[in-house]
Image (cartoon, rainbow, N blue to C red):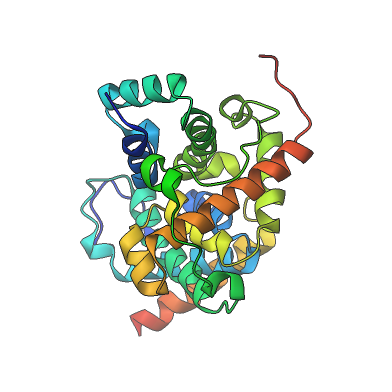
Amino acid sequence: MWRCIDVATALKAGKYRDLSPWKRFWLRCHVVFCFVCGKYHRDLMKSQDIEVKLRDEPESCCPHALDPEQAERLKRRLEAERRKSKE
Amino acid sequence: MSDLPAQAPDPEEWLPLYGDYLYRYALSRLRDRGQAEDAVQETLLSAFKARDRYDGRVEMKFWLRAIMRNKIIDVLRKRVKDCSYEDFQKEPESPGFLERFTGVLPGRVERWTFDPQVACERSDFWEQFNRCIEKVPEPGRSLFIMREIEEQDTEEICKEMKISANHLWVIIHRVRKALKACLNKNYSRRPEF
């Protein structure tokens, strides 16, 4: 059975979603029933849900794509650098 | 002539194919359009110089992303180092009994007014999230991105920034609290659950 400090250590080390299913099961059991750390760690897990999405799918979290002006500027700068490196 | 595996796109095609993806990735971490654009440029140039090392085992997009990740961490590291905030340099009090045995930091836990797991599937949530994270002051924001989003090693960050792991954890806890307070206040949609 996991103790509060085991839950804290696991959540500090990484995201709960990256734990093995078995570890995740014990962690969830603990935070559901623990009246000492349950509320705090459930809250932390909710924050981690957002962080995981931002970590794994940055393209869906950021609405701004390169605008045509930026793309053109980058294209020119890259071409110039490539020419320089070929010379 | 290209030194890339046969299935890899030509470097000339990298910008149209991956430019948007890389820019979004950089912007989601750096929150600065100019720096994000520079990061895309530097990434594509570094990749061009190192193209003979690409072996095709991972998708080109992820190879470029790995190069960009290092550039982003360099920018974030510099931002943190440039900070001279008193708050940042002041070591928090040593952990109390409750914290040492349960990992619970002191302070009231406010409830979420929406379910983050459901909300983070919506684009309007991310618009609000982006506004909220921009309000988080440095160095907290960069440390949060480095540790919690880019998952840089805690020990490495602490060694470089000359702070303790407990101090870093307290900073990240404050950022999470600030983000939550901002989202609770401003993200008005309440999904049905």
Q: Nearer the viewer, residue B130 or A39?
A: A39
Q: Is residue A68 above or below residue A26?
A: below
In the image: residue B100, left or right of residue B142: left
In the image: residue B125, left or right of residue B144: right
Count of number-bearing discs = 0
Residue at 65% over, 40% down: B126
**Furthest residue in direction bottom, as rendered:** A87
Residue at 46% over, 71% down: B77
Residue B53 position within the rendered picture, expressed as x and y whole percent measured from the top left: 22, 62
Residue B93 position within the rendered picture, expressed as x and y whole percent measured from the top left: 49, 62
Residue at 45% over, 20% down: A32
Can residue A30 be seen here? The reply is yes
Q: Quadrant of the N terminus of chain A?
A: top left
Residue at 50% over, 66% down: B39
Q: Nearer the viewer, residue B2 or B121?
A: B121
Q: Nearer the viewer, residue B64 or B26?
A: B26
**Furthest residue in direction top, as rendered:** B193
Q: Quadrant of the C terminus of chain A?
A: bottom left
Q: Is residue A87 above or below residue B92?
A: below
Q: Nearer the viewer, residue B17 or B182?
A: B182
The quarter of the displayed image where residue B38 is located: bottom right
Residue A29 position within the rendered picture, expressed as x and y whole percent measured from the top left: 38, 19
In the image: residue A57, left or right of residue A73: left
Can residue B12 be seen here? The reply is no
The quarter of the displayed image where residue B64 is located: bottom left
